[in-house]
Image (cartoon, rainbow, N blue to C red):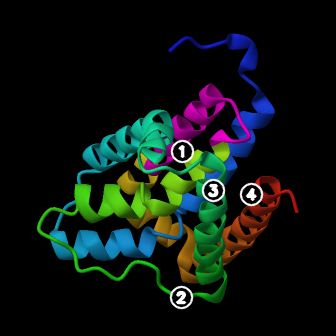
Amino acid sequence: MKFDFMKFNLSQILSTTMVLFAIIDILGAIPVVIELRRKAGHIESEKASLVATGLMILFLFLGESLLKVIGLDVESFAIAGSFVIFFIAMEMVLGLTIFKEEAPETVSIVPLAFPLIAGAGTMTTLLSLKTEYHTQNILVGIILNMLFVYFVLKNTNRLEKLFGKSGLNILRKAFGVILLAIAIKLFRNNTGL
């Protein structure tokens, strides 16, 4: 695939990075990551980050083709994605728990890389973003987010002490409100309302 360097746009990169940051919500997932680490004994941060990055990039490039195979257009998927993002945001704002699975023997890939980091909400968001932004700007947003995810996974215990329980709750709720606004924008842009 050929990249047009003129299409690199700082505004789009920042928007994409913030949207993905809010939907991945790795800071809000710190309590889940700590619990998984406690149950499994160890989390391979590198493996989890690389697998999640690979899944996201693969879906960014092949997601549209997969949708065509099952007879869906990107706009319909974006509208469906806006509902997914809306409900995830509502759960964040209302303080509900999204992730309730038991930790398997190896937690670095499942459930950490998928579905916690690169889950349905993230995949839906990628296709939704693709309707509004250039692919290379989304790609930069993915890479920036995954570098941050790796940093957080490596430093969960330090971050938990730094933010404290109330600090993490405030961050989670703030990003929940941002996600609500994003969901509404995606819905309006793809329905023409």
Viewer-side label of 4, 3 = 3
Reply above or below: 151 against 54.
Answer: below
Amino acid under disc 1: Asn
Quick check: 99 left or right of 107?
Answer: right
Magenta residues, start to end: 130-149
- Mark 4 and mark 1: Cα distance apart in space: 20 Å
Residue labelled with disc 2: 96
Q: CA distance from mark 3 to mark 1?
A: 26 Å
Q: Image height check: is 65 above or below 33?
A: above
How packed mark 4 is, by other alpha carbons closer than 10 Å (few <14, some 14-19, many 20 or more), is many
Distance from Cα at disc 4 to Cα at disc 3? 11 Å
- On the image, numbered disc 4 is attached to which residue? 186
- For image coordinates 25% across by 45% down, the residue present is 47
Q: CA distance from mark 2 to mark 3?
A: 27 Å
Residue nearest the observer in this picture, 187 or 157: 187
Q: Earlier in the sequence, mark 4 or mark 1?
A: 1
Q: Secondary structure at mark 1?
A: helix
Query: Which label was assigned to residue 102?
Result: none
